[in-house]
Image: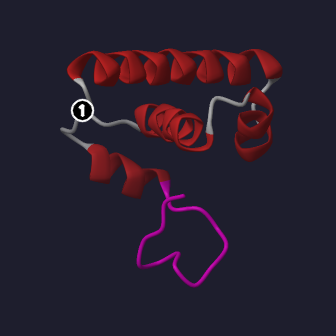
Amino acid sequence: MLINQMTALETGPVSGHWIDAGFRGQEATLERLRVDRQHEEALTHGPDPLHLAVVFDLDAKTAVHYANSARQLLQTSVERDTRSGL
């Protein structure tokens, strides 16, 4: 969700111009932010495709993709921590 000074008290979206101006010259894009948010949700709440599908209104195939990606990251992290003695 993106909110600016003009939309804080309304229910409408921010303008496309406001978004473009805010991201101009940055490596971040709305698509990257969306994907990052979905991955973060999968890492935080567990790699459950049904949860992801409901929270982000994803189709089943996309939800499974994000869940599998999170599962791999979590397993790699656990394996690395186990090897390092954490």
Above-or-below relation of 56 to 22: above
Q: The C terminus is located in which quarter?
A: top left
Percent across and percent down for residue 70 are 53, 24
Q: Which residue is mark 1?
A: 27
Provide the secondary structure element on which disc 1 rests: loop
Q: Report the residue at 80% width, 25% height from top.
A: 59
- Which residue in the rendered view is the most extreme toward the front? 85
Percent across and percent down for residue 60 are 81, 21
Along the line of sight, which residue is nearer the eye, 9 or 34?
A: 34
Image quarter for residue 9?
Answer: bottom right
Looking at numbered disc 1 in the image, what kind of residue is underneath it?
Glu
Percent across and percent down for residue 52 are 71, 36
Which region is colored magenta?
1-15
- Which residue in the rendered view is the most extreme toward the bottom? 9
Q: Report the residue at 59% width, 62% height from top.
A: 13
Percent across and percent down for residue 75 are 47, 18
Q: Chief secondary structure of the magenta span?
A: loop
